[in-house]
Image (tube, rainbow, N blue to C red):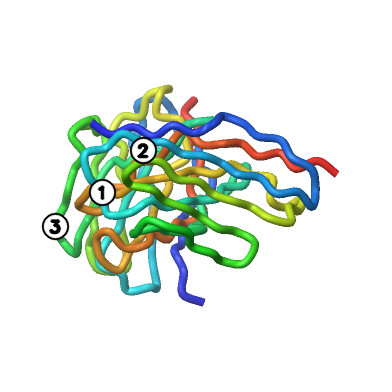
Amino acid sequence: DAMVIQNPRYQVTQFGKPVTLSCSQTLNHNVMYWYQQKSSQAPKLLFHYYDKDFNNEADTPDNFQSRRPNTSFCFLDIRSPGLGDAAMYLCATSRELNNEQFFGPGTRLTVL
Amino acid sequence: GQSLEQPSEVTAVEGAIVQINCTYQTSGFYGLSWYQQHDGGAPTFLSYNALDGLEETGRFSSFLSRSDSYGYLLLQELQMKDSASYFCAVQPSGGKLIFGQGTELSVKP
């Protein structure tokens, strides 16, 4: 089935140790998004790619980076995770901007 | 800026009808979306209103009034599995979804 896949589902890292979260999609959508969702809060957009064009939200910390090597894959790199970065990280895709967004199951990040 | 307000929690009984309201302040947007999120899960798209009026999808309906800056999600014939958080969201431009803070719906037997 066409879907959005995130690996791993649970990730534990140490304070300051770089970590990479992965997202892949079989929908062949042009747009891929990364959201951060903290407990009992709404998802918050970090950045998105339209094809290879990267769009960063103004308030996304520099600690967060992203790569999209091809249409199917997108990575979220956290260079130096802090305790405040513990959250659920959601990847989403849409065919075009302003179309319905399809979310992956998320990766729950724990920072020790 | 943009902001959306929705009740933090709603409780209803199985078989009942419940309405979750969403009021917003935004200078312009393409449409109002509703997402369902079960505890520990990912948001799942429920409904989208680009135009004013009612959109019906099975037991779920959504309504938008741009003149009143208001929308709602209506859930009919509530089931226990409908217990979840429900988020309204707008897309001002450029693909960004801005979510409300979510309404936690508890369905009781």
Residue positioned most to the bottom:
A1
Both labels 2 and 3 in a single chain: yes
Residue positioned most to the left:
A53
In space, the residues marked 3 and 1 are separated at their CA atoms by 22 Å
Which residue lies under the disc numbered 2? Answer: A44
Q: Please state which amino acid type lies under the numbered disc 1.
A: Phe
Report x, y in % for residue B73. 54, 49
Looking at the rendered image, the disc whose residue lies closer to the viewer, 2 or 3, is 2
Which residue lies under the disc numbered 1? Answer: B29
Report x, y in % for residue A76. 32, 47
Q: Residues within 10 Å of mark 2 (few under 14, many from 20)?
A: some
In space, the residues marked 1 and 2 are separated at their CA atoms by 17 Å
Report x, y in % for residue B84. 64, 44
Q: Please state which amino acid type lies under the numbered disc 2.
A: Lys
Which residue lies under the disc numbered 3? Answer: A53
Do residues under tags 2 and 3 come within 8 Å of each other at their CB atoms? no
Residue drawn at point x = 34 percent, y = 59 percent? B50
Q: Is residue B66 left or right of residue A112?
A: left
Q: Is residue A111 left or right of residue A58?
A: right
Q: Secondary structure at mark 3?
A: strand
Residue drawn at point x = 44 percent, y = 29 percent? A14
Both labels 1 and 2 in a single chain: no
Disc 2: host chain: A
In space, the residues marked 2 and 3 are separated at their CA atoms by 20 Å
Both labels 3 and 1 in a single chain: no
Residue positioned most to the right:
B109
Residue drawn at point x = 62 percent, y = 67 percent? B58
